[in-house]
Amino acid sequence: MKETGLEVDMARRWWLAASAGGTAAGLAGWSPASFAQAKPLPPVASFKDAGRVTVHSASGVETLRSAFGSSSITDIDVLFLRNNLGAPDASIVANPDAWQVQIDGVTSPRALTVADLKRIGIANVAMVLQCSGNGRGFFAHKAAGSQWKVGAAGNTLWSGAPLKDVVAALGGVREGMRFMTSSGGETIPPGVDPQKVMVERSVPWTAMEDAILAWEPNGKPIPLAHGGPLRLIIPGYYGVNNIKYVKRIAFTTAETSANIQKSGYRVRDIGKKGDPTQPTMWEMNLKSFVTGPAGGETLRAGMVQVHGVAFTGGSPIRGVDVSVDGGKTWQTAELFGPHMGRYAWRQFVAKVNLPPGSYLITSRAIAVDGSVQPEQRVENERGYAHNGWRDHAVKVTVT
Amino acid sequence: MKETGLEVDMARRWWLAASAGGTAAGLAGWSPASFAQAKPLPPVASFKDAGRVTVHSASGVETLRSAFGSSSITDIDVLFLRNNLGAPDASIVANPDAWQVQIDGVTSPRALTVADLKRIGIANVAMVLQCSGNGRGFFAHKAAGSQWKVGAAGNTLWSGAPLKDVVAALGGVREGMRFMTSSGGETIPPGVDPQKVMVERSVPWTAMEDAILAWEPNGKPIPLAHGGPLRLIIPGYYGVNNIKYVKRIAFTTAETSANIQKSGYRVRDIGKKGDPTQPTMWEMNLKSFVTGPAGGETLRAGMVQVHGVAFTGGSPIRGVDVSVDGGKTWQTAELFGPHMGRYAWRQFVAKVNLPPGSYLITSRAIAVDGSVQPEQRVENERGYAHNGWRDHAVKVTVT
């Protein structure tokens, strides 16, 4: 699903209309001055901290590298936003407990409200939410879509009902099911073929094991922009699988035929079209990046704390190396901060003494299974899954 | 230091003036309607989520029990607020890196800016911030001060420079020092004896070991209301010791003679005045409380997830028991969510089947050293340190 397609055209029209009209909720504070300097926050994300994000489009807001700070979680006020369709009407978050999700492909299929879910079980998991295209902005072939650098990712705490408890309460998954197929509650614009735009993703059914039907990120009721009142959270999987306004979860024998699964989010060579034979964006790969210095600064000579974050959807993080000479030499960083589980990111810091000069500072993560974050990106049409450490380096000048 | 004293009278006058004037920053959105229903948020805390807090006064805002939700951290938008003096001018958070803190009682005393601190070291710690008077509202003798129930506490992640690294960089603590005495940057109103109102607290100097000079709670620059641009964080210690706008840290031979240390925050029998011979509010005791159900609800019969939080400034949490009959019988709860270290709170949940009837639901925490959260409060003049499980119970009706 190219972002140049129909669904994004519609979002763009809505955004331009909102920008011009100024009567929609959330427009307070927009001024000609902010228009002149940068794109305005989309109304659905008007609560974001405009000074700490980059607005790519009506459906894409990125955390500035400097806005990650040195904390182990990402503030929701700067967490990236990426919506494949416009958000549903805000009325759905007014009474969150009434939202319904249909569970199918289990022994006793039924609809459950959020209030029902809260009586079935409670969990809380720290996990990295990352867009498939995070790092797209580093590809040389100008891959279509938001030109994310590092900030289409964030470490967040999600609380909700464990999906496995919900499924157990309904008698378990029916025999022969191979996928968990989940559908979002976005409104399909009239006259548009739902297959082309609907947000419906299939993942291996075993992903149910750690999944959560979530109502709170970082201790807050989920804002509409981030999928409230109920979002499917699949720790370790790319963002697109974490279905917003989730209205149905079905265990199925086949993957959905929705375009977002069939041809969208497929990794293929540059110039090729997407098809179901290609790998789809499921588990995240091993990645790290420096968040401080954030790049572009001029620092005075002396000791500097080079810090950042490391994460993966696979084998857990064992350690991180840091280089200040663009990867010629490396030193071992120290992991710090609370260890919030295998799906969270770990923070790392390396104390380095920098005499005057120019530096290219980067990091590479090492997993428990011995795998190492690669140097280079893997070229692909849509600019997905970029974890090469070379492109993620920051330049600083020391005087 | 009684809240009926001079410093709070001044805060109250400021608050009433702000309420009437309406020209100060942060007053947007105040309306006669919100006045009629509840006290308005103080301007310095105008960013709080008014629907999820109770406003006690211009210097006291409490998290509603229901607002803790089921997440392991507390949203800054609902985190309690308790200020002993009005906040300094907001200009101090405009350029946070320029704020200075003087370090004394070390081999090489000097002033350091926040920018300097960021080059010395970086840490991130999850810790419970709790007001000494949390639970005061349960005392029968109407102890003076905000009538906090459970919500003058929150679990927060603080990032900053480890104080021990800062002290090491300055040659270490001078010999013979027994206390760490820290001073807040609040403005002392003209004509008032500083001794009577200044926020300056002494703790054992060894508390330095885990302390942080912090610039970020939960991934956000510290708002002025919570002590920005720099706050001393002493994990495991009651809130008052976590000095806001910290401008000086001195290792000293004696405790400060400021009233807030000498006579304020002293635990003594009802009717007695505070003096330095009485215990002061340093390490927090073992405590837990239920956050869901939040109390007062009518629930339908069936399975309910009784959940809450447990924490301590001493021996770590080993487990939590839950009772639905006011403490006659107990069942073991399950700990869940990320384990964020000994100073964070742990979440617990117990699945209980409730037939129609009335229930008194509470919890008691057990520490690794075998100590158990007590049933009763310890009566004391100011209503400090309440951790008795009986008063913290919630009533629910099941139909």
Image (spheres, coloured by chain):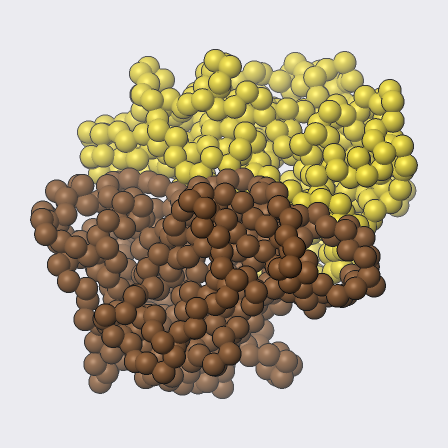
Chain colours: A brown, B yellow
Estimate the x, y position of residue A15 in percent, counting from the top left: 44, 81
Across and down, in percent, residue A181 comes to 21, 60
| Residue located at (78% from left, 18% from top) | B276
Name the residue nearer the viewer: B397 or A321.
A321
Is residue B151 shown to the viewer in this render? no
Whether residue A44 is situated above or below residue A317 in the rendered picture: below
Question: Residue B106: image x %, image y %?
Answer: 87, 32
Query: How many numbered dots are placed on residues in this image?
Result: 0
State the residue in front, A308 or B201.
A308
Residue located at (73% from left, 30% from top):
B208
Which residue is rendered at x = 23% and y = 55% of the image?
A: A204
- Pick whichever, A126 or B41, lies toward us: A126
In this picture, is A63 found above or below B341?
Answer: below
Q: State whether residue B277 appears in this view.
A: yes
Q: Residue at x 31, y 21 (%)?
A: B331
Question: Is residue B109 toward the left or the right of residue A119 in the image?
Answer: right
- A26 left or right of A84? right
In this view, A198 is above or below B2: below
Residue A89 point in image, percent of width and height: 34, 70
Pick the quarter of the image with the C terminus of chain B: top left
Is B144 on the left or on the right of B317, as rendered?
right
From the viewer's perspective, is residue B205 above or below residue A18?
above
Q: Quadrant of the N terminus of chain B?
A: top right
